[in-house]
Image (cartoon, grey):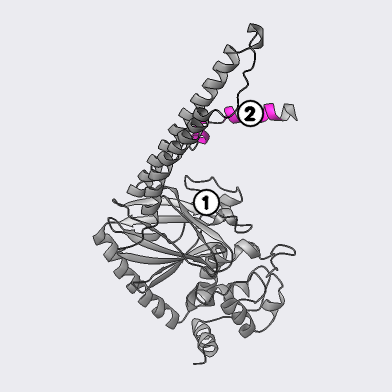
Amino acid sequence: MNALCVVSALLLFAAPPGAEAAWTLNLPTGSTAISLAVYDLHMLIFWICVLIGIAVFGVMGWSIYRHRRSKGAIAHEFHENTRLEIAWTVIPLLVLLGMAIPAAGTLVKMYDTDDAALTIRITGYQWKWRYTYLEDDIDFFSNLSTPDEQIQNKAAKTEHYLLEVDRPLVIPAGKKVRFLLTANDVIHSWWVPALAVKKDAIPGYINEAWTLVPEPGLFRGQCAELCGRNHGFMPIVVEVKSDADYRQWVADQGSAKAAEAKAAARAWSKDELMASGEQLYLRNCAACHQANGTGIANVFPALKGSPVIAGSVDQHIDVVLFGRSGSAMQAFADQLSPAELAAVITYERNAWGNTRGDLVLPAQISAAQKKAAGQ
């Protein structure tokens, strides 16, 4: 065991400079006023603790040396020393007040979500984030976009490995943004260090947080709660835009929604659905069912040769749209558009040796959704 520890230590210190770049012994100062306040509070408490340590261990060291046995020191016995009791009560009280007052002031600022210009509901899913803009008709999911080849060590890892998403959260610079956090399945935690925001997302409960980023930029974070086997594949990217760029982005979302509706109405070929479905499957389904459709024994069922695939198209659509109660199978009716759902179901029915030959169209998805809604 000792030899193993020595070898591990040598390998650690022999790591290339790139591996050491991410090492730090302190909090980041962040990019917002509240993150700087948190950093300043941290440093204040740190130095108070340093001074206490120096004082306590200094007195201990001096006492041990000054009253050592070799000098014939004899321990003094005393009882009910009023001055000493007052001193060791008052001094810690003053120290605690010196820590509590600035800490309380910072906490009050951190919990003050009033006067926000924008409110966004953040919902944690296994293993993705859903962002709903309550003032605008914008609602989308943000998924890990790191290629599977990098995860499987078949390709070189990029700078932001496992910290890349297909759609970042977009907010305006210079405006206070309020976050309402909850979860759809298990407890998650939305954490962006540079913004000093870390808040649990709990099913059936809503937590609040806020940020105000003064300048445009890109900030990364990740889920900080152990939320399942793919916990490390749940990144967060926040893109802060100037006010003009943000307003243009909001307008673009409306155009994208219209294009999505148009895509659902047009005719799709099987090749188009298969190509789109493969990408959607890798992004949304492969975490559980694996890229090759074989699943994980006793955890997530295989889709290759699955009874669901062998069954009717309507049954398959129902499972994907509404999930399965009592299992980890999520409902994707709100996560993907009809065109995307049609593509991924078509792909599942014709990939990995599944030879159903079925072509599922967006109109079938829309019809199933309307039927379920009683329309």
Provide residue 34's location: percent of width, then percent of height: 36, 49
Provide residue 193's location: percent of width, then percent of height: 44, 48
Going by the picture, which residue comes out furthest to the left?
Answer: 244
Q: Tell me which residue sits at (60%, 55%) in the image.
A: 226
Residue that mark 1 sits on:
162
Q: Main secondary structure of the magenta part?
A: helix
Which-is-in-front pick, marks 2 and 1?
Answer: 2
Provide residue 152's location: percent of width, then percent of height: 61, 51
Q: Tell me which residue sits at (62%, 72%) in the image.
A: 348
Q: Tell me which residue sits at (61%, 85%) in the image.
A: 314
In 3D space, how far apart are the residues under numbered discs 2 and 1 (Cα atoms)? 26 Å
Give the label on residue 9, or none: 2
- Is 2 placed above or below 188 here? above
Mark 2 secondary-structure assignment: helix
Q: Residues within 10 Å of mark 2 (few under 14, many from 20)?
A: few
Asked if residue 189 shows in the view, the reply is yes
- Is 321 placed above or below 67 here? below
Three-letter residue code for mark 2: Ala
* Residue 15 sits inside the magenta stretch: yes
Q: Nearer the viewer, residue 25 or 54?
A: 54
Q: Is residue 313 left or right of residue 252?
A: right
Res 318 → quadrant: bottom right
Q: Nearer the viewer, residue 96 or 3?
A: 96
The residue stretch that appears in magenta = 5-21
Going by the picture, which residue comes out furthest to the bottom?
Answer: 375
Q: Residues within 10 Å of mark 1 (few under 14, many from 20)?
A: many
Provide residue 164's location: percent of width, then percent of height: 47, 54
